[in-house]
Image (spheres, coloured by chain):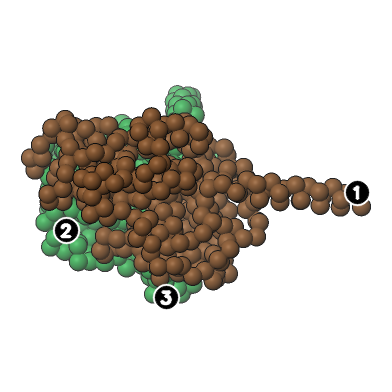
Chain colours: A brown, B green
Amino acid sequence: MIRILLTSAATALTLSHAALASDGPLVTAEWLEQNLDAEGISVIEVSVNPGVYERGHIPGATNVVWHTDLVDPVRRDIASGERIQELLRAAGVNEDTTVILYGDTNNWFAAWGAWVLDVYGVQNVKLLDGGRKLWEAEGRALDTAAPAHPEGAITVADADATKRAFIADVVAASEGGSADIIDIRSADEFSGKIIAPEGFKETAIRAGHVTGAINVPWGQAVQEDGRFKSPEALKALYAEAGVDGSRPIITYCRIGERSSHTWFALSKILGYDVRNYDGSWTEYGNAVGVPVTNVAGLVWTGQ
Amino acid sequence: MTTRNAFAAALLAALFCSIFLLLPQRDALGRPLPLSFLLGGAFGVVLQRGRFCFWCNWRDLLEGRGSNGVAAILIALMVGSLGYAAIYGAWLPNPSSGRLPPDAHIGPASLTLALGAAAFGLGMALSGSCISAHLYRLGEGSAGSVISLAGALLGFGLGFVSWNTLYLWDVQSSRPVWFPASIGHGGWLAVQLAALAALLSWAMRGWQSAPAASPWEAVFRRRWPAPVSGILTGLIATIAYLRVGPLGVTAELGSIARTTGTWAGLLPEGLMGLDGLAGCATVVKEAILSRNGVFVAGLVLASFASARLAGDWAPTLPPRAAIPRLLIGGVLMGWGAMVGLGCTVGVILSGTMAGSLSGPIFAAACIAGATGGWLVMRRL
């Protein structure tokens, strides 16, 4: 009897703890490990390197492939609402499910997933703080079997264009100052010393940044172990750069995935009004007649 | 066994263990480097003790010296197919989803693949071994293998130079064919095992029994029986795919050739579509230690130790007249492995086990090339 009482007390404690820990936009690895079997949770891995998910993922997590699942593979666009709905249903997601995303490469692509789900009005989407890297570093269990979830019943909304910045919005913000523009690429890309980091084939034919943008590289938003900095530290970081959330914000990078990470910090953790510009520099740096600032002065010579 | 050989083998084993302990835990993609090194070592021992050499096994069959070696390859393919199927069941329960299993060597079924494989076959007949066998023969002291491997590096360079033309002409329009996608995991496995079993029963007709030996002799001196090396190869291939990536021995060679060639300005800057194709991809090196690099290092080191232990270490210099043959054979193998996206290990073993049509295509064209080379050389 005593044991039953103790067990139920412990369960009650765990449940309240679970509810508490899942309130914010982030979940900790510890919380997730304790709540993997909980009802109403769906874990989705968005890793960009092939074979990473298959060789060991968080038990029960569903695999979503960024290059083919979350973007349109033919025209440059986010995946269609039907595709997203199909993916979510296959992962067992219902209207009231909490979706927890994580992935490799610092959660960049998982953050892209969170942004796309936000565009389609999916509620209760969270990121595993620290992503795959921290889960592995802490030696937590991994599974190699693909899970079979009962089909979910979620219906996604139409894409909300106000969550997304298009090139015209960026030009308008640059010229009219209607929004703060944050370029989260490296200082060298921002200043125009280089067009793209070494090894990237998709590039642009102009160097520099959107006129009026400020540079806060994405990595400044995280701690050494890959977890986001505290909300206070994040607030101070962006305030120091002149962004306090009093005006709308646009984030961009090279292809839009790292800027999703900063989008998540600003919109989900700090609650600011943020749009992600997924066209990013690979669109803007190739566009004709848009305002560009190139401090370092690198001239594209076709090399 | 001489004390000297035992001492040398012990020293090499100690070196192997030290490297194993000193390697970084993971590469950039999170694959375990020490495990890759260990699997390379295991593969090296099996290659050396089993004389698991694609060309010598085929030549033995051609020349009536027994089909045990060919049987070992077929058994390896059967065990490996079972292993891959077990992994597929967990990773990709629905094979018709339009996705291919990650990393598996399911390359495009192209004419270029067949051309590359035929050149590879001819090259191995000329040089006396395929690339994996040259690697384990390094451990037996074969200086001729150094020449052929140098030729292979050169051949890789030629492969890169010809790649863009071949890609636009043929590879781009070819598609990978993965049998489970059309006939299901079970259907594929049944057909594959039946086909391999039929070939095995044919090969068994030329089986030659080994004379009885003491356990010590059987393990450390004599060539391992075909089922032993076959089953072990299939197991190593399965573990490698599950934990690190499919077996292959040319990715590192290709990377070295590509990095050197790019650095020297001899290669085209962009190799079209290459980085997106499945197989022994040959990327420009970004890190000194790659999973294939440590695999090959483990293979050579362990086969060296194993050869010392077995008394097979016999440093030999090739006769001067053989040098052009060894070099040209190497060049042909390097070119073939580059345009074919792998060699006997990376395509015949890893491709066939993976249920890819590229495996049987490579095998058939490679056998044709090798047999052609053998016929010509007999007449000379």
Q: Name the residue at 69% across, 46% down.
A: A17
Residue B170 placement (x, y as % from top left): 16, 64
Q: Are marks 1 and 3 on the same chain?
A: no
Q: Which mark is residue B167?
A: 2
Instruction: Estimate the spatial distance between the alpha carbons at disc 3 and disc 2, rounded to whole Å.
Output: 29 Å
Q: Amino acid at mark 2?
A: Tyr
Q: Position of residue B31 (x, y in %)?
A: 44, 42
Apparent side of residue B151 relative to residue B49 in the rendered image (left or right): left
**Between residues B234 and A4, which one lies in front from this camera angle?**
A4
Location of residue B355 with respect to A225 vertically, above or below: below
Circles 2 and 1: CB atoms closer than 8 Å: no
Q: Secondary structure at mark 2?
A: helix
What's under tag 3, amino acid-wise?
Ile
Q: Secondary structure at mark 3?
A: helix
Does residue A126 appear anywhere in the picture? yes
Q: In 3D space, how far apart are the residues under numbered discs 2 and 1 (Cα atoms)?
A: 73 Å
The chain under label 3 reads B
Residue at the spot of label 1 = A2
Is residue B269 positioned above or below B364 on the image? above
Q: For this rendering, which residue is in front, B88 or A130? A: A130
Image check: B2 left or right of B331? right
Q: Earlier in the sequence, mark 3 or mark 2?
A: 2
Viewer-closest of B292 and B28: B28
Report which residue position mark 3 lands on. B183
